Image: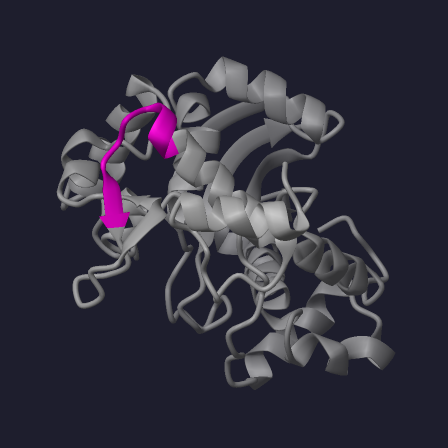
Amino acid sequence: MPNGNSLRTALSQHCVNETVDKNDFQRRARLLQALWREERNLPIGQVSKRNLRCIGSSVAMPYAQEKLANYLTETIREVVRAEVLDPVKRAGKVYTKPRIFDNLLSSQPLCFNLFGELQRDLPLASAVLGALTDGRLTRVTAIEFEHSPGRGDPRFTGDRSAFDVFVEFEGPRGRGFLGIEVKYHENLKGGTSKDNDRYHEIADAMGAFDPTRRGRLLGEPLQQIWRDHLLAGSLRLDRPSGYDDGAFLFLYPAQNLACADAIGEYAACLTNKDS
């Protein structure tokens, strides 16, 4: 990939020289998505309905939605039709439109591109995720997208948090789950939510956090990771939900140093990484 002046030139040539990108990883990721779109002769999109400027990392609407051009295989497109376009299935779920169709850098379509094939082939999902979790699961029984055990439910975190991907499985410990957050281009900036007592009740019950470092979890860039981890912890602790095991996973590209640094800082706040 180009860098320095050659990178800036390439960004301009492919209509992706965006001031919102704050580091070279973000710039290169946007450039790669523009090149991917061009190689497939997909029509270039616009920044928004109000801002009609062309941007190379977007596919034109309504073409993007009609063709589901942001998705890699026909199987994945079938999953998107079932999960996102079906009004019954998507009830209660939050899919940001048109980003899920036209934005090649959005993590929501990435979730489907990563896990859509696995949802339709659970034996393959069992083999892949069993290997990635070092045998913690033996059989995947279901994969859901944009899943919450109960938005706003005080049994859990009491907020609107949800997992990007939710995997149910059977394993050596019994019935379990993986609550997965997926990042791509994001830098974990953008504000924090109001702290509440329920977060700390769950954190205490989980027994996974260094109390001397709890304060570091309340601000950027760690709070979002913490809230999702707490959602997983609250579900694992909730006996009526019937889980014997459960863990939170945070997926991101290795080159996304903002996420890598945040995860390193977050891990330093843990005393137990089982969850």
Kindly identify the residue that appears in the image at 82 percent across and 77 percent down. 213
Q: Quadrant of residue 2?
A: top right
Left or right: residue 136 compared with residue 89: right
Please tell me how many numbered marks the rendered image carries.
Answer: 0
Residue 267 visible in rendering: yes
Image spot of residue 9 (x, y percent):
52, 48
Q: Quadrant of residue 78?
A: top left
Q: Looking at the picture, does residue 205 appear above or below residue 172?
A: below
Kindly identify the residue that appears in the image at 71 percent across and 63 percent down. 206
Frontmost residue, 262 versus 147: 262
Frontmost residue, 60 versus 215: 60
Image spot of residue 124 (x, y percent):
52, 15
Kindly identify the residue that appears in the image at 18 percent across and 39 percent down. 65
Q: Quick one: quadrant of the N terminus?
A: top right
- Magenta stretch encompasses residue 42: yes
Q: How is colour applied across the structure in the image?
A: one colour
Q: Quadrant of residue 112?
A: top left
> Which span of residues is magenta-colored?
37-45
Residue 180 visible in rendering: no
- Magenta stretch encompasses residue 266: no
Image spot of residue 220 (x, y percent):
64, 75
Frontmost residue, 57 versus 221: 57
Kindly identify the residue that appears in the image at 38 percent across and 41 percent down. 109
Image spot of residue 211 (x, y percent):
83, 77
